[in-house]
Each structure stands twice: as C-alpha cells, then as structure tokens.
Amino acid sequence: MKLFKDIVIDFETHFKDDSILINDGVERADLMLNNEDISYLEESYLPKNNWRNCTDFERFTLLDSSKELKSFQKILVGKIPFEIASMLNKAEFRKETSREGVMNCLANNHQLTSNLDLLLNKFLLRFSPTRNFQLYKLLVLYPDRKTTAIVDYGNEMKFIGLHFDSTTVFEIETAKFSKARFCLNLGLESREIYFINLSLDTIKKKILLKNPDEILSLKNLTPTFFKYFLSTRQKLY
C-alpha cells in the first residue's frame, strides 16, 4: 500500500532521525516462527524485521505538529517531566527483574507510590484540565516483541501479535470519539510502539474497496486488513 497522510506523529521534543523506522510490512506469525514454546492465536501477524530510516517524503507524511489536529488524528510522543524522572531514578523498583518484584516494591513503599501518583496526576492535568482520566492498568513488560500481549485462551496462554489496544467499548465508526490513551514508560529500558498511520475508518474503507462483501467488526478488522495489505508498517522509538 502506498503511504499517505492520515494518522500522524507529533513529537513534543526534538526527534532523532532514527526515532521512526519503517519496514516492508507484516507476515503471519506461524510463517515467521518455528519455536514450539511460542503459541499465537490463529491469524496473528508480526512485523518483518527489515526496518530502515524514513525517506524525506515518508517523514513528511508521518510527522505533523499542527495544533489544528484533533487528538484522534495523531499520536503524541514526548518525555515525562524532569520532576517525575528524578523521582523514578531513586525508585527501588527499577532494580527489580520480575513482575512480582516490581509490584511488591511499589506496595511496600507507600510514600514513593503516593508521591508518584500526585506528580502523574499533575502531569496529566496538562492534557485534561477537568481531571477526566483514570488509571487503566499497571503492567510489567519485558523488551521482547513476542511478550507484549498475551491472552488466556482456555487452558492455554497465547500471544496475539499485532493488534489495536482499547480501554473502552466502541465500534469502528465511534472509535475516534473514545477517550485518548496515555502509555507511560516508568522503566529504564527503551520501548517501541508498532503502528499503522491509518484510522479505523480508513482501514474499513480500504478493505471494502478490495472486497465490498466483507463483514467487518472490531474482532476481525486487524487480520482482515493484514490479509489484503501485508506491506504497511511503522515503528516508533
């Protein structure tokens, strides 16, 4: 699929040339992996590993800091405030190497957790002065693309590959009216976000141009899109 402007990236701070990478698309997980210890849901997809820097045209297409854009038209990327970063540098949980260790450390250090909560709330008021925000989930994730998302599938835990995240209930047509989602990295390791610069509305339209008879829902939108368009993917550091 030819790259065109839809969802854009807005960097709050200056970005490096390699902050955004682009590749040739995705492959079905069962065609990419031969590891019997890794089990994916059917029709799961993973990004190809041929990442490269963006061309000038691709960078122009993917980046836009216009203040006229609405929140659902962009992905805002920035750094947490210095005050929070300084507190995190003193946090013992950053030394932990397991999920249980991190959670226990936060639970046992009530003062740190309380102060961190106050500072994070102050930070979020910049984006929602009415305090219309709430904590969705505290996760401990490891820097491995195969362990980013996992679900309980009967008596077996399975990875789900590339997908779109949602914290509220919505339909394809109403997704843009749902609340914005913030992901804060409180750890020391860098994190990556894989994204397609297309809204759900655009994805639906693209699929129906390929096959007007497709019956689409949030459940099948991702695998159906990748079935028709394997060559579109971006990665953000």
Image (cartoon, rainbow, N blue to C red):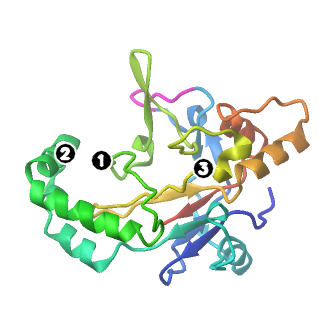
Q: Of label 2 and label 1, which has the lower sequence position? A: 2
Q: Nearer the viewer, mark 3 or mark 2?
A: 3
Where does the image place residue 236, in percent across and percent down from the top left? 53, 65
The residue where tag 1 is placed is 140
Front residue of 174/82: it is 174
Query: Do the CB atoms of the residues marked 2 and 1 lie less than 8 Å apart?
Result: yes
Question: Residue beneath label 3, please?
Answer: 178
Say which element carries label 3: loop
Sequence-wise, which precedes: disc 3 or disc 2? Answer: 2
CA separation, marks 2 and 1?
9 Å
Q: Looking at this rendering, what residue extends furthest in the front direction?
A: 130
Residue projecting furthest to the top: 155
Q: Counting other residues with Cα less than 10 Å from the Cα at mark 1, is it few (<14), some (14-19), or many (20 or more)? A: some
Bounds of the magenta segment: 35-41
Q: CA distance from mark 3 to mark 2?
A: 29 Å
Residue 180 counted in the magenta span: no
Please rate how many residues cluster around mark 3, counting C-alpha atoms within 10 Å: few if below 14, some from 14 to 19, many from 20. Answer: some
Mark 2 = which residue?
Answer: 103
- The residue sitting at 72% across, 73% down in the picture is 61
Image coordinates for residue 180, horizontal then vertical, percent: 54, 56
Magenta stretch, main secondary structure class? loop
Q: In which quadrant of the rendered image does the N terminus lie?
A: bottom right
